[in-house]
Image (cartoon, helix red, strand yellow):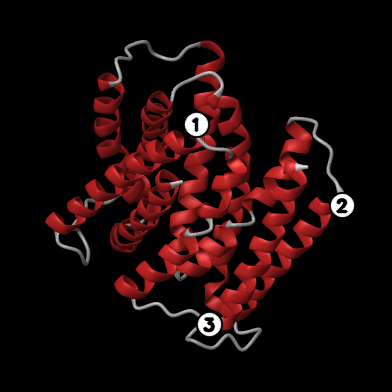
Amino acid sequence: MAACAGGMLFFGAMDTAMKAVTIDIGVVAALFWRCMIGSLMALVVFLASGRRALPRGAALRLHLLRGTVVAGMAVLFFWGLARTPMAETIAITFIAPIIALFLAAVVLKERIGKGAMMASALGLAGVAIIAGGRLSWLGGGGGEQQGVAQWPGIAAITGSAVLYAWNLVLQRQQAQVTSPQEIVLVQNLIIGFWMGLAMPFAGGMPGDQVLSAPLAWGLLALAAMLAIVSLLLLSFAYARAEAQALVPLEYSMFIWAALFGWLVFDETIGWTTLAGAALIVAGCWLVARQSRA
């Protein structure tokens, strides 16, 4: 449980570093340079684990598919994060477990029960309330009314949550045929490959804009290290404790996002974000209860 809680803390810190760099040089360049640094770090971890063989067959196909899905997910997420407060971003992504339930029904032929229907309604209502506060449909308070120009960020984050749900299903399949060290290394390489193709059209060098070059490179290295540590901690946790004991700890990401957003970007939280997050978490709890039954 301590490893899971630490993983969530480090993921929140990684998002903070990536948001700063994304605002500075754009999402494609930020992801490309983070993956290049992360690939070197992950290679060290991979070799230190005593592994040498490269993935083949079914494992390689899963790596390619999941890496491509995660690449799209990351672009949408960090693009939206650069335009939306961190607490709201994380709250919206909480709908991913609900979406994953329906994807599992399609991919894994699982049955969808009444609880899942209610969970979906609660999750969608939560996203609507958060969006209402952000787009001034509701009196959000706390600095949330910032005009309709914010809707692209919310749409991108919602799309990222859909891809993240697909990623959860692929992650379950992938964990059965490969190791965490291999997953971390190959995922960095695949995402870096896709971002590299886009670099001539949307790339940039760290330090080109607002941030100084040493600070930008430092944040990228920090983000890469935090991402690897977080993934390894979560892999350690889920290998040693039941999912039903660990899943509630993943909602601590909302706390870290709110804290880091306030400390680093001076972001505030209104009642609509809190209410929407509560509804989404309630929906996820229904899914968890149904899965346990």
Badge 1 amino acid: Ala
- Which residue is under mark 3? 270
Is residue 261 rendered to the left or right of residue 1? left
Which badge, 2 or 3, is on the more N-terminal residue?
2
Q: In the rendered view, would you say 137 is above or below 82?
A: below
Which badge, 3 or 1, is on the more N-terminal residue?
1
Is residue 156 rendered to the left or right of residue 28? right
Badge 2 amino acid: Lys
Residue 131, how many percent across, how many down?
A: 62, 73
Which badge, 1 or 2, is on the more N-terminal residue?
2
- Which residue is under mark 1? 239
Q: CA distance from mark 1 to mark 2?
A: 30 Å
Residue, x 51% and y 36% (percent of image)?
238
Q: CA distance from mark 2 to mark 3?
A: 32 Å
From the image, state whether disc 2 or disc 3 is nearer to you.
Answer: 2
Q: How many numbered discs?
A: 3
- Which residue is under mark 2? 114
Which disc number belongs to residue 279? none
Residue 13, quarter of the rendered image: bottom left
Residue 90, how many percent across, how many down?
A: 51, 61
**Dot 2 lies on which element?**
helix
